[in-house]
Image (cartoon, rainbow, N blue to C red):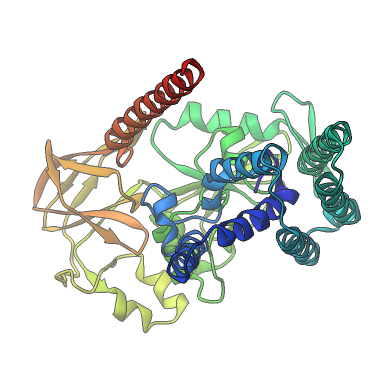
Amino acid sequence: MPNICITIFIYFFLGQLLVQSIKKCKSYKNALYGILITFVGILLVFNPGMAIAFNGFAYAQARYTFVLMPVAALLVAVEWDRLTRKKEFSFIGLGLGLISSLYIAIKAYNKASLEVRSYDAEIIMLQICFALLLLVMFLWKNRQGRKIVESLLIVCVLLSTCTETYMTTSQRGTAYTTTEAIGYDGKTMTNDTIEAIRYLKENDNTFFRMDKTYTFLSTFGDSQVAGYSAVTDYNSTINRNLSEFYNMLYTGAIVLDAQRFFIYSDESEVYPMSLINLKYVLTTEEVGYPWGELIRKIGSVYIYRNKYADSAASFYTNTISQSECAAMDETDRRMLLKDTLIVPDEQAALHETERGEVKLGDFVADGKYFTGTISNEKEGFLLLTIPDQDGWEVYVDGKKTETINGDYGFLAVKLTAGNHDIKAVYHIPYMKQGAVMSVFGVLLLVGYCLWLYRRDRKKKQG
């Protein structure tokens, strides 16, 4: 957990909580109930399948445990009060906390980068010092002495927080778009990348995606800093359906939350690239991609246009089920994307190989809307390269239309033959319900605080 939860000391407080809770159990029934609650809590927190409760009831992501920060802070506050004011202390809890802390530090050392490993000895020393100070605070009956020890414990907490903050910030490079030169892979890159992106935005007002064959500002999150729609970088929170799309294309890789680079030189890559409207690729050298057309060179950046990408939407009159697709090898799957839509097994199939005349208008992203037009001679499915995710609604000619999962990762709607106006709108799931619950929670908290204030005031008066 982040340093605001007093990371390396959290297990000391957890050990005290467990032991003190068991001590207060007056019967085996209460003890078993406590163990059951603890087990369910652990299962809920660390099982991604159940952890959706901590992620707005959406698909759990790699960092969903961040929502436990308030719980950890409350745990520290409660146990600190128990140790300092109520003078309740457990040797067993201290031992459990120390063992758990050292175990986690050693396990983390085995997985950490070389830069972070150098701090492991410092972390272990802080943990041991914290344990000794807790022990001294309990054994030292002198009030002034206990105050000194409490102050030293706070110093340990500050050292822990500052150390982790330094580890987090010093091992991460910070780049600014106003910088004259930015380094990558031992080379120097000027703001030519920013200029190339600006050129594309000024000359193409449709919605498109672009990518780079080099690292610009950071390995992850370039698009957020530079302001473009990317296809290969995701900062820990890739949509589950989108990861299924990538895993379908690349069976040898498991895509959960990081990166997926297209193999630009592979001819079969043309179809997934065109499907998601990967329209432009930036490089730092001339390349001979069969699908690429060099349209401009800005400084040291070459801009290649994908000749086969023309829209963020595609129309299909031929479908195949996911189970049928799973039986194919990955190259055939990528080739399949040219003219066939992959649909869930329960979806009624279409087998019209001649799709007739289709005219796709420009699809434009404007704020929370994604709009465009289509004229199709035959009935079929329109695929929008928007990740299939709760919150999206698609309107066809002003009427809300049921969506299905298309090509594992995206939204698709069924269209009758004719001319259609398409509008996709995104609403944050459960936003209204969350707002109501938040207001209710604040009122409940205020009411509880007033009740405590009046209760304490009556006690003092009586």
Say which residue appears at 30% left-offset and 80% top-offset.
324
Q: From this viewpoint, which residue is outermost toward the bottom? A: 327
| Residue 261 pos. (x, y %) | 59, 59
Residue 323 visible, this orientation: yes
Left or right: 367 as drawn, with respect to 341: right
Say which residue appears at 35% left-offset and 29% top-offset.
444
Position above or below: 255 against 330: above
| Number of on-image labels | 0
Q: From this viewpoint, which residue is outermost toward the front? A: 462
Q: From this viewpoint, which residue is outermost toward the top? A: 461
Left or right: 39 as drawn, with respect to 14: left
| Residue 59 pos. (x, y %) | 40, 56
Left or right: 175 as drawn, with respect to 370: right
| Residue 221 pos. (x, y %) | 61, 43
Position above or below: 354 against 157: below
Q: Which of 330 and 99 is in front in this view?
A: 99
Position above or below: 118 against 49: above
